[in-house]
Amino acid sequence: MIFSTSPKRTFVEFPITDFSFIKQQMLTWASPFNICCFLDNHAYGLSPHTFECVLAAGAVDAIQADAGNAFQQLKDFASIHRDWLFGHFAYGLTKETEPINGGPATPLPDTIGFPDLYFFLPEILIELNSGRIRIGSFRKDHEAIWQQILQMPPAGEPSAPLHPVFTPRISREEYLATVGRLQQHIFPARPHRSLAGLAGPQSGFSQPFFRILPAGRTFSALRQPRAIFKEDGNDPSLSADQRHISPLPQRSQS
């Protein structure tokens, strides 16, 4: 069912007595739908919020798009359907929000195959709160949906524990080599440019001039400048005024 203009969704409310049981029945009822989305607040005490759970089942209309003009397409889609929309944004949309200067970057392999953007207009929308359930539909089938939910067994735990198998994209050796290249890019192999070079016999520091202090203590030891960077040709090097270098206070062992 595709709408060129948005139809009117109507809601009917029903009382409930067992919130947790009805929630599990809702999940069983929604499982046959090819598209559904369940949002659960898990009784998180952030106020204000309107409902505890929302279930969107079925799709009367949907949009999917890849990066390029995806956000505008979604805006146009939402302007037609002034209703709830559920979906996702994928990382590939950064090509719209953060374009790469100098031309397109080499695309990363997509092993999942999801579109960069996908949103759907749900056929049935159910809001669940303590003491009541509210069913929204484009048809006058609210009572029938409610009776279907009541006949459902609660969703249970899987009969066998799930043990997913994770396969790394790269080996441990490739990962470490990549990290090493990043370190070389951030800290080129020049004198006094690495963090280790900030303390030691060659730097003139008898001990590091930084330390993690316990909570509640001030950084009074760092009020005086300890070191400065200066340019010597094209190679910045570290120089220090030894008169301003002093050990940080040691914590009492007593």
Image (cartoon, rainbow, N blue to C red):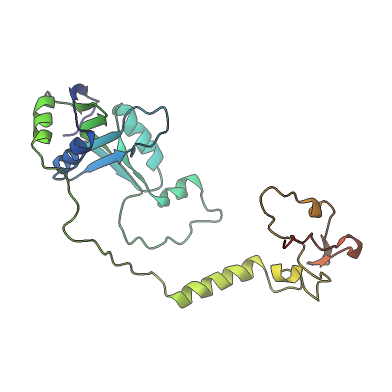
Q: Is residue 144 left or right of residue 238?
A: left
Quarter holding residue 238: bottom right
In the picture provided, is 91 more to the left or to the right than 33? right
> Compared to 98, does 83 lie above or below?
above
In the rendered image, residue 140, in percent from the top left (x then y), is placed at 12, 23
Q: Count the marks: how many?
A: 0
- Report the front residue among 157 and 181: 157
Where does the N terminus fall, quadrant-wise? Answer: top left
The residue sitting at 20% across, 22% down in the picture is: 13
Residue at 11 percent across and 34 percent down: it is 150
x and y percentages locating residue 47 in the rendered image: 42, 29
The image shows residue 253 at horizontal and vertical percentages of 72, 63
Out of 100 and 191, give the one closest to the viewer.
Answer: 191
Task: Name which residue lies at 33% across and 39% down.
Answer: 42
Which quadrant is home to the C terminus?
bottom right
Residue 185 visible at all: yes
| Left or right, 94 with reference to 210 | left
Task: Report if residue 59 is visible in the image.
Answer: no
Foreground: 146 or 73?
Answer: 146
* Depicted 188 relative to depicted 4: above or below: below
Residue 174 horizontal side relative to residue 25, left or right: right
Determine the residue located farthest toward the right in the rendered image. 243
Residue 216, position as x, y percentages in the image = 69, 47
Residue nearer the viewer, 222 or 112: 222
